[in-house]
Amino acid sequence: MPNALLTPTAVIRKALQILHQKLTFAGGIHRGYDDSFAKSGAKIGDTLKIRLPNQYTVRSGATLATQDTNEQSVSLQVSTQKGVDLNFTSVDRTLSLDDFSERILEPAMAVLAASIEADALSMYKDVYQLVDGDAAAIALSHFLTGRQYLNESLTPQDNSRTALLTPTHANKLVDGLKGLFQDSEAIAKQYREGMMGRTAGFNFGETTHLNTHLTGSAAKVTTYTVNGAVTTNGASQVTVQTGATTFKKGDVFTVVGCNMVHPETKVDIGRLQQFVVTADYAGGAGNLQFAPAIYTSTGRQNVVAAGMANGAAITKVGAGANELLTNSMVFHKDAFTLATADLVMPEGVDFAAREVYDGISMRVVRAYDINNDQFPCRLDVLYGYKTIRPQLACRVHADG
């Protein structure tokens, strides 16, 4: 007779545990908005407005100088449904839960996790801070520079900072750091497991799902210049002079003289503000879209008052023309968010169940094929993902 432990509820609980273990990136970012979708009537396409922190300026002297509160928000939409479809027999149901997990659930959840990870990691294109290690071998110094960029953006200095590496970067970094730690257990893990643990304020991890980024045909010295100064608060495009080369969404650039300011004191920190291209640019004279939007005054000021000066040169960061850009990344969990919602429970099926594990909701629906004595079964997840505060993240590029 069928194993009493191999019920749909037991299957979905085990599937959720396996999925959670395999979500390297998505499992480590903010998921505090799940409860907002876990309500009766939530459906595909539902949107949640997430308010961003307000920013103000400081008054000098005794004279009152009131300022408006201009709240900004981003939208998180749950519109991505993915799942894995299984078909097991009455014989399969006689397996123990452990055997069933190893044979069927492990590979099924591996491909589902990989798909969710690939979706979530596409948010790298929203990250405008980039450590340029082009033509250099990866080193701890690159991640220390990333730490500097996060600190200058006032990223919380807590245990929620992660450095997520490509396998190539992880291998070379572990090899370069061997013997530098005094913790004998940490050294043992480096040699036996290739693990770094916590270093330089980051929890180091590794994933095969980090995307490489193919840049546009513009060289580092792009030949493009600003055609008309950009100083208007909230501006997110710059008109450029004629050129033939392209930019791809996700390319990073700087503008000569357009420096970043301290988020609170508004003092020039002496480093060029980096911008990420938000839409492919085909070349020629036109408008290049970018983020973050420029603010030259008010509490949201992020660049010097001169903004992007007329005639200033535009320089690409991280890679040259048509070059693959590696995307190891350092980030605080609050830079990104992923939320799941409860899928509707269908009627008229053999069995349907829904479970939540650490904020991830999954539904299982099972039918029965009487002709073939099989149980078609589907495991589905409905989710959405969004970059909430890109200033709390930084991409790390190095060729070697």
Image: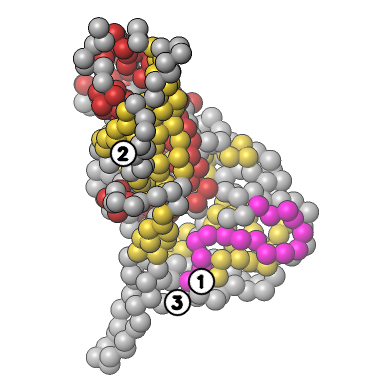
Residue receiving disc 3: 297
Q: Position of residue 198 (x, y in %)?
A: 28, 34
Task: Name the residue nearer the viewer: 307 or 210.
Answer: 210
Q: Quadrant of residue 66?
A: bottom left
Q: Position of residue 124 (x, y in %)?
A: 49, 45
Q: Indicate left or right for 357 with 41 as reference.
A: left
Q: Quadrant of residue 381?
A: top left
User: SS for tag 3?
Assistant: loop
* Precedes in sequence: disc 1 or disc 2: 1
Question: At label 1, which amino acid type do we have?
Answer: Gly
State if disc 3 and disc 1 touch (CB < 8 Å). no
As drawn, 158 above or below 357: below
Determine the CA span between mark 2 and mark 3: 41 Å
Residue receiving disc 1: 234
Q: Indicate left or right for 281 with 146 as reference.
A: right
Question: At label 2, which amino acid type do we have?
Answer: Ile
Q: Is residue 358 magenta?
A: no
Q: Which residues are magenta?
A: 280-295
Residue receiving disc 2: 360
Instruction: Name the residue rendered at 34%, 26% in the picture.
Output: 350
Instruction: Name the residue rendered at 65%, 61% in the picture.
Output: 288
Quick one: label 2, few (<14), some, or many (20+) residues within 10 Å? many
* Precedes in sequence: disc 1 or disc 3: 1
Q: Position of residue 337 (x, y in %)?
A: 37, 48
Determine the CA span between mark 1 and mark 3: 10 Å
Instruction: Name the front one of labels 1 and 3.
Output: 1
As drawn, 30 above or below 275: above
